Amino acid sequence: MVKIEAFAVEQWMDSYETTAKYNTAETCCASISVDDLHALSDDKESDPFAQFQSTKLTYGTIRGSNQLRNILANLYSQLFSVPASLGAEVSLWKSNEARGWQLEIEEPKGIIRPNTKLIIINNPQNPTGAVIPRSTLEQLVDIAREKSIIIHSDEVYRPLFHNISPADPRFPPTLLSMGYEHTVVTGSVSKAYSLAGLRRSLSISHRWACEWVKLQAGTTAFVRFNKMGKPVDDVAFCEMLQERTGVMRVPGSLCFGVGEDFKGYVRIGYVNETEVLEQGLDALGKFMEDGYEDVPVKKPVAK
């Protein structure tokens, strides 16, 4: 018979989560009720249970119900409609046929408000096929820099340039190369490269805007605790922490490692109820002051 190794993390959770006062080891987001979910709906009048009571428990519509697909279809819209749908105030900066579909750079100065957060441009433009020349981009950057406004440049049609050469002084560089740190550029392989089936896109920005997009993702953090430069015994740390404070963590070496892996690391779940996380962190802080000295250093694994 095939022997499957014990799933240590589940065994740990099963042993400790029912007695934890502050479960900050969970990977799931804080749960909500059906009533909470209904409260998020725009339709406050309907009964959220009515449709389920008469629904037969078949496999359902394989491609998704028309109601669901209609809701999802609305998410694909022009750039200015998306922020408007989320409640943002949108002012339109319009190009003009009489000017060869060029933008008048003085217009943004009149429509930018004290609370303006984002300027969105499309370059090359759709549907006119015009481009926003370098000089206009330079002036736009100056306007945005004065108020630290983010510029989002949708460059999905780059590099499809037909009647303008890169040697032309009007040729538009990618906005990302213009030295303005509050810049986001988006594009895809669907237009210029005719690879829409690959479903690939890109979003590029300067580091300041993407520092939060780190390798750590999801709902957990993996933190190492040390003493005098050496990792602590993470199993003992988690056991003592929960016993003394009620704060639950998951030991990395036991639940995720093999041999010498993840010594001193503990998993922290941070997408909890805000009150639970805050109180759990407060309790951890007190433990670090009063009880951390009792936590032993991790011993080498016997070979």
Image (cartoon, rainbow, N blue to C red):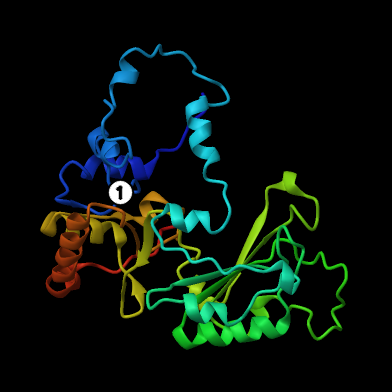
**How many labels, in total?**
1
Q: Is residue 170 left or right of residue 274?
A: right
Reply above or below: 40 against 47: below
- Residue at coordinates 67% horizontally, 82% vertically from top-left? 136
Foreground residue among 35 and 146 = 146
Reply above or below: 146 against 98: below
Label 1 element class: loop
Reply above or below: 203 against 143: above
State the image coordinates of residue 283 (x, y, percent, origin top left).
14, 64
State the image coordinates of residue 55 (x, y, percent, origin top left).
38, 14
State the image coordinates of residue 159 (x, y, percent, origin top left).
79, 67
| Residue at the spot of label 1 | 26
Foreground residue among 91 and 30 = 91
Most extreme residue toward the front, as rendered? 98
Quadrant of residue 19 within the rendered picture:
top left
The kind of residue tagged 1 is: Glu
- Residue at coordinates 48% horizontally, 36% vertically from top-left? 71
Foreground residue among 72 and 215 = 72
Asked if residue 215 can be seen in this view, the reply is yes
- Residue at coordinates 37% horizontally, 43% vertically from top-left? 8
Q: Residues within 10 Å of mark 1 (few under 14, many from 20)?
A: many
Foreground residue among 43 and 72 = 43
Reply above or below: 115 against 281: below
